[in-house]
Image: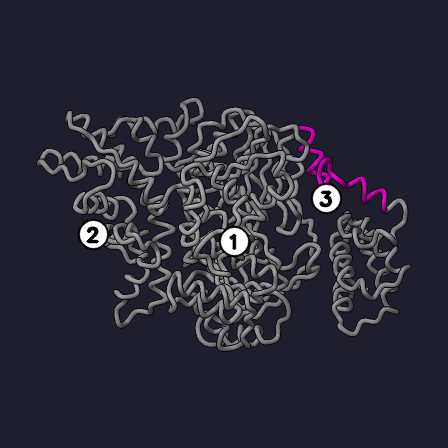
Amino acid sequence: MNYRQLRDQLGQEDLQSSKMFEVLGQIAGHVNNKETHNQGRDLVIRALARRDLCGEFETRVLASLVRNVGLYPYLSPMLESVEDDDFLAYELHRPDGLDAVFHSLQARIYYQLRSGSNVVLSASTSVGKSLLIDAMVALGKFKKVVVVLPTLALIDETRKRLASKFRERCHLITHPTQVARSDKINVYVLTQERVRHRIDLSNIDFFVVDEFYKLDFRRDDDKQRAIELNLAFHQLATTGAQFYLLGPNVQSIKGLDKYEFHFIPSDYSTVAVDVVQFDLPSRGDDRPNKLAELAQLIEGSTLIYCQGPGSAVKVGRRLMRSVEPNNPESCAATAHWMADNYHPEWAAVAAVQHGIGLHHGGIPRALQQHMVRMFNDGSLKFLVCTSTLIEGVNTAAKNVIVYDRRRNKNVLDFFTYKNIQGRAGRMGTYFVGKVYMLEKPPVDDDVVVEYPIGEQSEETPLTLLLQLDDDELSDFSKSRVEDAIKNSFLSADTLRLNGSVPPDIQNRIAGIVYQKFKSGDVALVWSGFPKHFQLIAVCEIIVNELSGPRLNDLGISSGRQLAWHLSTLSQADGIPGYLAEIARGTLAHQVVSDRIDEALKVIRNVITFQFPRDLMVLDRIISEVANRLEMAGPNYSVYAEATENLFLPPAIAALEEYGIPVQIAKKLSAYLHEYDLDRTLDDLRALDLGKVENLSAFERTLVGSVQSAI
């Protein structure tokens, strides 16, 4: 039988156990043929899903096939039935110091890394690329390790995984306020921005960059984050440390010629995937109707990918009308808490009450983690998500429905589509994943990643080139940098310190500040916390010159509006009071829930991230202009730190990243150290929740789940 016939037969519900020996024999033919070996591996995985139909002899045959295709971890439940040589092969695939068994691709990479080689691995989501990080830590040969991850959600997942295995041996550093310890292996788990701001990474031994394709700024919606990742890689690689880059679906990489490395693109997979394609139009009722139909019929945990938060909310509401509520006690408790602490009209509240999770950029980080936890433990059957979940976070999803073929407003490229598709199935949990593509999928193409520092061209951003030394620049790039500095009002040092902002914008701001000072306007000169008119003055420049388009998308079109958000959030009642004010200001043609989502994105993307960065850019520009005019300059650092921490003590605000919502963290603050995060975590780990006043049952359960993972 050919591959398709065998696949269909293994998928039949009425497949008889008497047929399994014949089926396994046919699969062996594919496995032993070099040209069909990959299809044979896929069939072996599908046969594993039907292992309940195998008798003792068939199980031994299946185990032999599993070994032949290198899927050694799948031998674990069959060890009593395997032959001696199969058992020996299984044991030989154990890494040193780690309770795990590798499949053949992992073992190949492991021994290359262990020998000291640099490796760039491109393989599917299900392969278990991250387990190799754990294996390298387990060796104990590296005393200082850096893991660079694109999102805080991935930092949390990686931290939990490493903590569960190496809590006694390693000191895990995820936050800017933490410092290294001399008595343990120091493992830094950081975003690229946090790497760039650390001064203690000059003597590392080994580093990892996850989702390395983001080095190519053409492949990231946020070009500035791609630049930061390039500079972070450059900063770490110039130490001479060994590196391991990992990511999915890349056929080649350019620009790393100065480094010796093994590039390994692999189509190895540990799960099988069935794709069902519908080719429905993007407009009209066909897609919503098909979604409702699938939701009623589909079995198992299901991720539903949407292009953005607005689409995710619409899909969530459609599901609530189409499927019966699945609201175990955990869903009801979560929904009640969200209503009390955010807003009762927030769409995410009604969705969770119905047993449907939402995961997008408007959901606070701690709640995102809680949604994933509920999805993985089966409390939520459906998790409606955007790219915030797709990029790297592991979920126990049997099915994936790709509702939109777009990401924000752009059509998905084949690379991103394959990344989404890779979320279906999970090794050891769901052997066969299903992907339902409601629109026509993108055209297949090869993905080539370019490292811009090594492949400099006229397209290479000047903000990246300004951060490099002269000997790292091509002649053409050097002339671009020299021209930028020569024609700049501001010094080269200021241009470089404000590397996230193009020189022409920096100089335009300097001109505005110069004219204000010459006219006697000193509203921009303040320290500590500003008066309201001073806050408006800096906000006007930020809105008009720095982050206007990004802020406009969130309903902020003036400095006065931005200052209102900051001032309202700084009040004693914090997020609940701020959201209540947002709801009260909702106009007749607006939806309260949409305004809540927008406001939560303002908190996450602006108040705690972009605004403090922009404020320190202004601080440097204004300080230089003031110095030239022999005036006293500003000092915005105190207020920048306050906004970054939502006007809370830094260590308390940081608990959001560990899975504790800000509202609960404030209740715990009286029992924890407020300024040293490591001491805060020690206090939290040892805290007797029975002695904490004013915690609800839900809050005790949530904090308890975080305590066990610190």
Where residue 111 sits, quadrant-wise, is top right
Provide the secondary structure element on which disc 1 rests.
helix
Q: Secondary structure at mark 2?
A: helix
Between residues 537 and 253, which one lies in front from this camera angle? 537
Q: Quadrant of the C terminus?
A: top right
On the image, numbered disc 3 is attached to which residue?
Answer: 100
- The answer for how far apart the CA atoms under marks 2 and 1 are is 45 Å
**Relative side of 377 to 221, left or right:** right
* Other-residue count near label 2 (Cα within 10 Å), few / some / many at <14 / 14–19 / ≥20: some
Q: Given the image, on which type of amino acid does mark 1 rest?
A: Gly
Task: Name the image quarter holding residue 617.
Answer: top left
Name the kind of residue labelled 2 in the image. Answer: Arg
Marks 3 and 2, the one that precedes in the sequence: 3
**Mark on residue 560?**
2
Decide: is 268 above or below 137. below
Can you give x and y, in whole percent of width and height, for residue 311 in the image?
Answer: 43, 65
**Coordinates of residue 696 in the picture (x, y in percent):** 47, 60
Q: Which residue extends farthest top?
A: 471
Mark 3 lies on a secondary structure that is loop
